[in-house]
Image: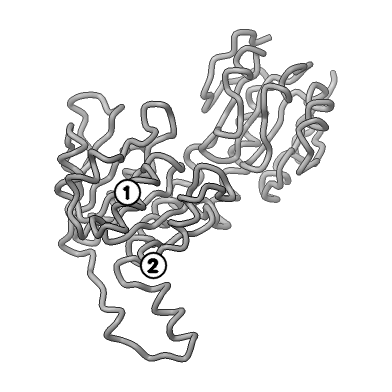
């Protein structure tokens, strides 16, 4: 019986690689950073492929899938995979939604705290030789209202931590079934009401046509001028142009940004946000902890091998037309 062949197309934690190497029926090739044309030439020779965010699995890459049956993303978002093309070619697309839940929720909370206490600018000032305490008076989180937009795993994890800091938590989720409750969260069905009442707003929805610019002009129009916004989900859920306008006009007090429309950022609006004195911008660090990278690598390895062995299909984001 031939071995299951798995292509590791991105750099992957050794925890995942070591697990794969211990599987007697699995053979792996580690080829990170292949250009799309090269990836397209070799992908058909593998049963499965494991990626992170660096590789773009385009329709061209999947044009001749050969024996390929599954692409596993070591992470949550599958923006770098042409899911409709994979579906049409009979290729499962899997993700690992649990592995970076804690790390991303903690990062969102870190951005909230850092913005409120002006940590980055205070550190830069001290490094420059100044001692300017008055300039960096901040605000506390305790007693404030946090609006969480998107009540999946990460949104709920953030809400739980915010409750521990004695914040009042509001929640809105366009995909949450009616009547569902979340412990410690006041569920709202009107996004504008959440925006009107919140001191902090953190978005945690997937990126889709329904959530693009979910926080836009109408929402900024009702926010408190003291509001601070956090995006550690996907670029474009908060309308970047409207955010920049609100910051410049004093209709928002700050923003913490970890994600962008394109990465690295290319648009003039995003570059202006990164340079803005009221913005704390970082280079997509939500899942960048040792623990998260180990967990998503192991989970991606396990779910793709389980599928290829003919077992249960877990964490599929599509249902292939051809599953043979």
What label sits on residue 315 in the rendered view?
none
Q: Is residue 169 left or right of 299 when viewed as pictured?
A: left
Residue in the picture at 26% in, 78% down: 137
Tell me if residue 138 comes above or below residue 68 in the rendering: below
Label 2 packing within 10 angstroms: few (<14), some (14-19), many (20+): few
The structure's colour scheme is one colour
Which residue bears the numbered disc 2? Answer: 277
Quick one: 224 or 301, which is closer to the camera?
224
Q: Does residue 151 lie above or below 46 as drawn?
A: below
- Mark 1 and mark 2 lie on one chain; the one further toward the N terminus is 1
Q: Is residue 37 left or right of residue 135?
A: right
In the image: residue 90, left or right of residue 177:
right
User: Where, by quadrant of the figure, is residue 176 drawn?
Assistant: top left
Q: Position of residue 2 (x, y in %)?
A: 85, 21
Image height check: is 289 above or below 312? Answer: below
Q: Quadrant of the N terminus?
A: top right
Q: Quadrant location of residue 156?
A: top left
Which residue appears at 34% of the width and 47% of the height?
A: 157
The C terminus: image quadrant: top right
Q: Residue at x 55, y 40 (%)?
A: 75
- Say which residue label 1 marks: 202
Callout 1: helix, strand or loop? strand
Q: Nearer the viewer, mark 1 or mark 2?
A: 2
- In 3D space, how far apart are the residues under numbered discs 1 and 2 (Cα atoms)? 19 Å
The image position of residue 293, as x and y in percent, is 59, 50
| Residue 37 % position (x, y) | 80, 30
Q: Which of the two residues, 262 or 110, is positioned nearer the viewer here?
A: 262
How many neighbours does mark 1 have within 10 angstroms: few (below 14), some (14-19), or many (20 or more)? many
User: Label 2's element?
Assistant: loop
User: Residue shown at 20%/34% (left/top)?
Assistant: 181
């Amino acid at each position: 019986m031939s071995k299951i062949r798995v292509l590791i197309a991105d750099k992957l934690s050794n925890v995942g690689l070591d697990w794969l190497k211990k599987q007697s029926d699995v053979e792996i090739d580690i080829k990170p950073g292949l250009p799309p044309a090269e990836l397209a030439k070799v992908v058909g020779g593998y049963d499965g492929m494991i990626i992170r965010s660096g590789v773009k699995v385009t329709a061209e890459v999947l044009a001749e899938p050969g024996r390929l049956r599954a692409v596993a993303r070591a992470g949550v978002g599958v923006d770098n995979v042409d899911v409709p093309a994979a579906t049409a070619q009979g290729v499962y697309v899997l993700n690992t939604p649990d592995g970076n839940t804690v790390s991303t929720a903690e990062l969102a909370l870190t951005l909230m705290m850092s913005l409120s206490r002006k940590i980055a600018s205070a550190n830069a000032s001290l490094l420059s030789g100044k001692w300017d305490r008055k300039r960096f008076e901040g605000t506390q989180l305790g007693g404030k209202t946090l609006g969480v937009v998107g009540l999946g795993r990460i949104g709920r994890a953030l809400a739980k931590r915010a409750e521990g800091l004695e914040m009042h938590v509001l929640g809105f989720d366009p995909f949450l079934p009616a009547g569902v409750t979340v412990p410690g969260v006041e569920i709202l069905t009107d996004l504008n009401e959440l925006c009107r009442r919140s001191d902090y707003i953190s978005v945690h929805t997937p990126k889709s046509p329904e959530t693009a610019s979910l926080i836009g002009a109408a929402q900024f129009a009702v926010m408190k001028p003291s509001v601070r916004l956090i995006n550690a989900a996907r670029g474009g859920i908060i309308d970047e142009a409207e955010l920049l306008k609100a910051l410049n006009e004093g209709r928002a007090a700050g923003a913490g940004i970890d994600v962008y429309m394109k990465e690295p950022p290319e648009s003039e609006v995003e570059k202006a946000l990164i340079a803005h004195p009221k913005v704390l911008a970082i280079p997509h660090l939500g899942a960048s902890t040792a623990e998260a990278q180990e967990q998503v690598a192991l989970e991606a390895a396990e779910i793709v091998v389980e599928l290829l062995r003919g077992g249960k299909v877990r964490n599929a984001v599509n249902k292939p037309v051809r599953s043979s």
